Image: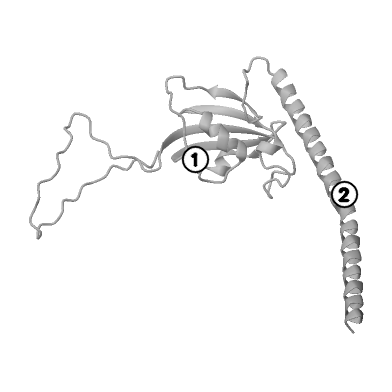
């Protein structure tokens, strides 16, 4: 009886082992196919980026009078209006106020500045076009900059689901009107002394109401 039980157990173990081995063998081609697909996809993306960069470089060469700068993020920009007097630039936690016009790479307007209206951006805390997130932080107040963004710095494969299509390079003209800290500190009016701490008052007295200066609006 014990011999019969051992034989049945051995047989079941052998069947399970064979089944597991067949299952593993069946998975291998899927893994290889997945790796091949990822490599082809990466190769296509590299060719796409190279093609878009060639178009942008040709635009730059065709405008020798305009000085373009290459960013570390893989886009190019030039100044229409440059502010060399200021040194401050927007940083994380600032609120940036700007105007924007968007064109295709041939210069045709997609979104006019009047259509978009004044823009507000909480620096590094808000989702906007990747190129703009980086580009705005390069600007000084009252500057106007033309950005040449390849699609991977714009809206990529999906576009914006409105007027901007798949893998579309863009020309974005940005005017940075102003930027302020998200929580601007209270300022002292020039020519006045720094107020001293108020003296302790009886519990029944009402606290003084101080008018705060609005520093959020540009």
What residue occupies the far front of the structure in this picture? 2
Q: Tell me where residue 57 appears, x and y as whole percent.
A: 72, 23
Q: Closer to the camera, 6 or 17?
A: 6
For the point 91% across and 70% down, the residue is 15
Q: Is residue 201 left or right of residue 140?
A: left
Residue 35 vertical placement versus 174 (above, below):
below
Local SS, label 2: helix
What secondary structure is found at the residue carrying circle 1? loop
Q: Nearer the viewer, mark 1 or mark 2?
A: 2
User: Residue 160: horizontal and vertical position, in percent?
Assistant: 67, 47
State which quadrant residue 217 falls in: top left
User: Which of pointers 1 and 2 lies earlier in the amino acid sequence?
Assistant: 2
Query: Residue 112's quadrant in the figure?
Result: top right
Residue 141 position in % (x across, y down): 45, 29
Q: Which residue is mark 1?
A: 123
Residue 26 vs residue 127: left or right? right
């Amino acid at each position: 009886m014990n011999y019969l039980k051992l034989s049945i157990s051995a047989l079941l173990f052998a069947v399970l082992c064979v089944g597991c081995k067949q299952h593993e063998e069946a998975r291998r081609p899927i893994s290889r196919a997945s790796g091949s697909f990822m490599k082809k996809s990466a190769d296509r993306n590299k060719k796409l980026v190279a093609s878009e960069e060639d178009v942008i470089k040709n635009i730059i060469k065709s405008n020798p009078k305009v000085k373009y700068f290459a960013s570390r993020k893989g886009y190019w920009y030039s100044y229409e209006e440059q502010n060399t007097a200021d040194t401050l630039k927007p940083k994380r936690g600032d609120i940036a106020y700007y105007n924007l016009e968007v064109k295709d790479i041939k210069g045709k307007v997609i979104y006019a500045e009047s259509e978009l209206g004044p823009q507000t951006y909480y620096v590094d805390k808000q989702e906007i076009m990747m190129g703009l997130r980086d580009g705005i932080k390069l600007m000084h107040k009252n500057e106007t900059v033309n950005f040449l963004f390849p699609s991977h710095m714009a809206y990529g494969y999906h576009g914006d689901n409105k007027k901007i299509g798949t893998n579309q390079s863009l020309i974005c003209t940005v005017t940075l009107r102003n930027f302020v800290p998200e929580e601007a500190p209270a300022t002292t009016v020039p020519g006045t002394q720094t107020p001293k701490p108020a003296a302790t008052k009886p519990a029944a007295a009402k606290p003084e109401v101080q008018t705060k200066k609005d520093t959020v609006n540009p």
